Image: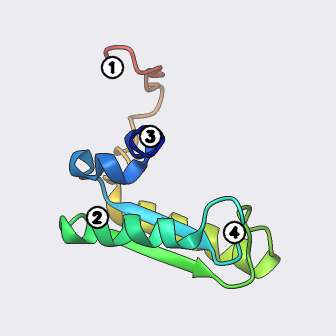
Amino acid sequence: EQLAAMWRRSPCSHVDRISAPTLIALGMSDRRVPPSQGMEMYYALRSRRVPTRVLCYEGEGHALDGPASDVDHWVTVAAWLNEHLPPAPAPLPEGIERAVSFGVGV
């Protein structure tokens, strides 16, 4: 029963509902979430042909807070978003402002 409850909360149990490109970052010395769990998710998504990439940072824990890892991680995230998000909308003519969307009908 406990294993079934853990499985229901696992992201891997919902992999069939994921279609968005997914970037996974793993600290290979993470003591909170074993890197093997991130690799399991990576292989599950790849088997479903979801665009997926995994970043492995040796010597990093859960926070990925080493200076070199931090820079590499955020540069890679920016490149990933530029690759997978639609382009920014064209600028509006001078004097016209874009409405601010809070996710309600816009």
Please tell me how crowded label 1 is: few (under 14), some (14-19), or many (20+) other residues with Cα within 10 Å.
few
Under circle 2, the secondary element is helix
Q: How is the image coloured?
A: rainbow
Task: Give the x, y percent position of residue 20.
Answer: 29, 53
The span from disc 2 to disc 1 (Cα, nearest Å) is 31 Å
Task: Give the x, y percent position of residue 63.
Answer: 74, 61
Q: Which residue is mark 1?
A: 106
Please tell me how crowded label 3 is: few (under 14), some (14-19), or many (20+) other residues with Cα within 10 Å.
few
Given this view, does label 1 or label 4 mark the residue nearer the observer?
4
The span from disc 2 to disc 4 (Cα, nearest Å) is 21 Å
Given this view, does label 3 or label 4 mark the residue nearer the observer?
3
Q: What residue type is disc 2 on?
A: Leu
Q: Which residue is mark 4?
A: 30
Instruction: Please report whichever mark, 2 or 1, sits nearer to the chain's N-terminal start.
Output: 2
Q: Which residue is at 21% across, 70% downward?
A: 47
Instruction: Please report whichever mark, 3 or 2, sits nearer to the chain's N-terminal start.
Output: 3
Q: Which residue is at 40% across, 49% downward?
A: 11
Task: Give the x, y percent position of residue 16.
Answer: 21, 50
Q: Which residue is mark 2?
A: 45
